[in-house]
Amino acid sequence: MDLYIPEVFINARQEVYLILKNQGNTFIPHRNLELEVCWDDSSMVRFNLDSMDPHFRYPGDSSIFQLPFKVQRSRHLVKARVDRLNQLAESDEVHNVYSRTLKTDFPEAPVPLTYFPGSKRFEPAKYLDLILQAPFASGILWYEDHVVYPVAYWRKAWKDQLISKLGAIYSGTPVPLPDTLPWSLSRDVAFGVYLNYIAHSLWLEMEKEVPWSLRGMNPDDLSGLWDARQFFEWDSLSREYHPGYQISGAVSPQHPLVSYRFAAFLNGLPEDIPGSIRRFLDWGRAYLVHAEGKGLPVFQTAKDIYYPESGQLHAVNSCWASGGLMADYCRAFNIPVRRHNIELSNGIHNQLEFPTEAWYLVHADDMYDPLFYPLPGSISSTRMLFNKSEFNQMLRGRPHCLEDSCHSKGTQLSFERRRNLLSKALDLNSGYLMLQYDQGRNKFREFIRGDRFEKFLVPLFNEEEERAMMEKIKAAKPDYHFLSTLYERFEACKNNRR
């Protein structure tokens, strides 16, 4: 049994339909299953599937449901989720959501997102007091002409702008999102974008929208949330700001509400920081597709990755984009995150540190490494992360040499990282690793030796270690046909192949 939403579409009569399919091999019983669909972040409908067209219950079959939404602008954002309460034990539990931008022939108009503050009262004085307390007073940093201004010392006009942004949250003022941000930003535009994130962060803290507080945390760990130098670069000649490719990642900052509303729909509000990190990695592992290549845009937006156009994938054009997207998610939930560069064998890449957990996503592309697909059973996506000890061990690795040639620093880091990831995968009984063994002994040895990495001068594992790895896989007695089916199904859902 495996439910999957392959498409939501608008027909020629401007009616909206959703396709629901059973990708599995067994019949789906009646279990009070729910289908939940959100339209433009404002309209929500829920269906009890027990009373709907039953074709989706049969293996390989699907049903088409009409949705009660009105098409009235050039673009509509749609999110859908099936079996939100996990009533059904599926072979693939992660591909139960769908999110796309549906284009129409209506006049161009941005899709607004909205805060839903309920009956909470806005009290500006409390926020003015909050920004004078640690760590906010010295941690929230705007900069102009390379001069840094802590929020405690902002001029009155700047604080008034911040209070205005906070007031818009409480009033539920719609937030229109342009499709793109220009490469060059005036001071006022850049400051406005920056205040979107600061106001959101303060609101999360003040209203306890997340069950942890930033009070008492190390100020250095909060720079990724509050330091404007982690958002933009300053061009002294043109006196303009630019999104920072290696500073903040190749996802242009716009508004944290994009990541916040998207993640809240998928998972509800977070329970703790580790679980929130895992939730994003779960989604990234299941849906993000690396599409690096010539002609692709350097900068993307969070909205375009979360909501690609119909028929397109959740593509990230570089590790800088995948890391930038996760950094944007962390800002949306006040999760301390620090971004670093790491030199690997083929250049400089994006790395994320989660300081409160002492976790490292050594290379942002690791989040969709098939070694950590949840096959044949559950594998926590956080297992791809390095802990502090593993990270330090990677940094301490002595360069391997062959005769008078030795690994460069970047090649040695690539070597240590890959060896660690493969060792983790073996410990987790990774289905993908088992499938490599099923291709034959020689193919498996090429895979675990790292033969495809041309700059490696020595194998990742010696012969004794290779034998031990093969013996461990054989002892597990995997069902290779079943594993292959699960892997192909996972990839089909990820790549939206029906």
Image (cartoon, rainbow, N blue to C red):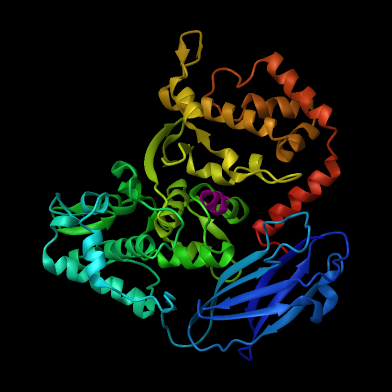
Q: Is residue 376 left or right of residue 364?
A: right
Quadrant of the snapshot with the N terminus: bottom right
Vertical arrangement, residue 331 with respect to residue 98, above or below: above
Q: Nearer the viewer, residue 338 or 206?
A: 206
Quadrant of the snapshot with the C terminus: bottom right
Q: Residue at x 44, y 76 (%)?
A: 116
Residue 12: percent from the left, percent from the top? 63, 88
Secondary structure mostly seen in magenta is helix
Q: Residue at x 42, y 83 (%)?
A: 108
Q: Residue at x 45, y 48 (%)?
A: 323
Q: Residue 483 falls in which quadrant of the image?
A: top right
Residue 44: percent from the left, percent from the top? 58, 80
Residue 426: percent from the left, percent from the top? 69, 30
Q: Is residue 457 left or right of residue 227?
A: right
Is 97 colored magenta in this rendering? no
Stretch in magenta: 275-281
Q: Nearer the viewer, residue 398 or 338?
A: 338
Q: Residue at x 44, y 24 (%)?
A: 395
Q: Is residue 382 left or right of residue 377?
A: left
